[in-house]
Image: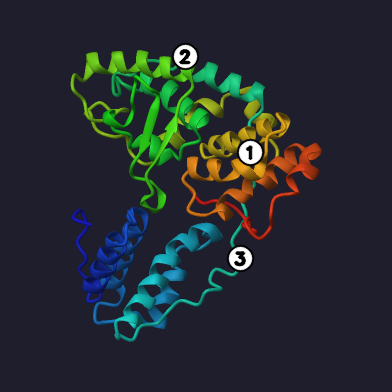
């Protein structure tokens, strides 16, 4: 929050609300950015208002014409929570109704085929050198392998520190994660060797670096970089033009990891009920409900497993539509 200045008359409430969220253990980074934009909007359009009003919220909701419902939901949710907070401390404020937006669009994940994965990683392995970003040639092949092989979120891989990656044991500590829930994931021996070779190169370029995937300045890459890199290599592949439905995304590597892991357990005859909590913890889900989405994907892509998976207790794994990144 130190990077943002809140200048509207409701700015002090926003600052206190963000501090409360962070004190409760939430990073609240994305929502802080949204509330900062909301503060700028309020200071410009409603400079005399000392609380959240219905008129203010209506203007905020319609700020971007043609906006995707999921994008609108991301903009509305922190403002709705802020209104509830202000009411909770005794300061009357308008709260955006829970039905806004009317319908959140479900995004169907793309589960990569073996051929698509081979083509993509062959492409990133041929990443050309860039005089503007000398580390990208080495970072790109490794960071995408970690995303797929370990099921990490993009931000988790991008923000890794050097100390988070144990090159002796293959353990990767995820410290700053969704919900501020730290966890440890373990790489395969093959991936560990790749990481060791990569680290040796990076140490020669940035001796004593703190960031595992440094940009040209030795800092973490920007938030949007993985999406740009992904489309740079994926979009030019013949395999990308045969994908039907929603276009493939970086986050689908994470979905693919979970689906293939569950698929492997089922084919091995493992007890899914016993192993389910482990994959939920491994992926950093705050509840089993967030992991249940992957069972529906396994059933969809591997129909022969429907009977096996149907034995999982519905009370333990309630319905959930999808996992947000």
> Mark number for residue 126?
2
N-term-proximal mark, 2 vs 1: 1
Q: CA distance from mark 1 to mark 3?
A: 22 Å
User: According to the image, label 3 marks what residue?
Assistant: 103
Q: Nearer the viewer, residue 286 or 21?
A: 286
User: According to the image, label 1 marks what residue?
Assistant: 110
Who's the residue at 62% across and 50% down the image? 292
Crowdedness of circle 1 by 10 Å Cα count: few (<14), some, many (20+)?
many
Crowdedness of circle 2 by 10 Å Cα count: few (<14), some, many (20+)?
few
Type of colouring: rainbow
Dividing the picture into quadrants, the one containing residue 22 is bottom left
Q: Is residue 71 above or below residue 197?
A: below
Dividing the picture into quadrants, the one containing residue 6 is bottom left
Crowdedness of circle 3 by 10 Å Cα count: few (<14), some, many (20+)?
few
Task: From the viewer's perspective, tell me whether residue 187 is left or right of residue 11.
Answer: right
Q: Determine the secondary structure under disc 3.
A: loop
N-term-proximal mark, 1 vs 3: 3
Task: From the viewer's perspective, tell me whether residue 317 is left or right of residue 325.
Answer: right
Query: Do callouts 3 and 2 mark residues in contact (Cβ within 8 Å)?
Result: no
Tell me if I can see residue 100 in this picture. yes
Q: CA distance from mark 2 to mark 1?
A: 24 Å
Who's the residue at 75% across and 49% down the image? 310
Query: Do callouts 1 and 3 mark residues in contact (Cβ within 8 Å)?
Result: no
Q: Position of residue 322 (x, y in %)?
A: 59, 52
Q: Is residue 11 above or below residue 171?
A: below
N-term-proximal mark, 3 vs 2: 3
Q: Nearer the viewer, residue 184 or 238?
A: 184
Q: CA distance from mark 3 to mark 2?
A: 42 Å
Of the two numbered discs 2 and 1 in the rendering, the one whose residue sits closer to the viewer: 1
Query: Do callouts 2 and 1 mark residues in contact (Cβ within 8 Å)?
Result: no
Who's the residue at 46% across and 45% down the image? 284
Q: Determine the secondary structure under disc 2.
A: loop
């Amino acid at each position: 929050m130190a990077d943002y200045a809140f200048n509207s008359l409701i700015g002090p409430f926003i600052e206190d609300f963000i501090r409360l969220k962070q004190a409760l253990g939430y990073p609240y980074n994305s929502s802080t950015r949204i509330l900062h934009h909301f503060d700028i909007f309020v200071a410009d359009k409603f400079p005399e208002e000392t609380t959240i009003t219905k008129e203010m919220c209506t203007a905020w909701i319609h700020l971007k014409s043609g906006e995707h419902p999921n994008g609108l939901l991301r903009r509305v949710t922190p403002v709705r929570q802020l209104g509830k907070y202000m009411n909770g401390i005794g300061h009357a404020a308008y709260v955006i109704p829970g039905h806004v937006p009317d319908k959140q669009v479900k995004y169907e994940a793309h589960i990569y085929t073996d051929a698509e994965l081979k083509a993509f990683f062959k492409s990133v392995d041929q990443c050309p050198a860039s005089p503007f970003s000398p580390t990208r040639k080495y970072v790109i092949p490794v960071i995408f392998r970690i995303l797929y092989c370990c099921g990490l979120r993009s931000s988790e891989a991008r923000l890794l520190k050097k100390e988070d990656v144990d090159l002796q044991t293959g353990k990767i500590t995820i410290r700053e994660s969704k919900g501020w829930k730290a966890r440890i994931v373990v790489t395969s021996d093959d991936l560990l060797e790749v990481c060791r070779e990569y680290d040796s190169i990076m140490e020669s370029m940035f001796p004593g670096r703190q960031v595992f995937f440094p940009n040209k300045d030795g800092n973490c890459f920007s938030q949007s970089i993985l999406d740009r890199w992904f489309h740079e290599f994926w979009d030019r592949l013949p395999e990308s033009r045969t994908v039907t439905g929603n276009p493939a995304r970086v986050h689908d590597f994470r979905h693919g990891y979970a689906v293939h892991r569950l698929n492997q357990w089922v084919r091995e005859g493992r007890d899914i009920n016993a192993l389910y909590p482990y994959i939920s913890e491994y992926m950093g889900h705050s509840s089993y409900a967030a992991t249940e989405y992957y069972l529906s994907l396994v059933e969809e892509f591997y129909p022969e497993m429907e009977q096996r998976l149907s034995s999982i207790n519905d009370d333990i794994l309630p319905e959930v539509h999808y996992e947000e990144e």
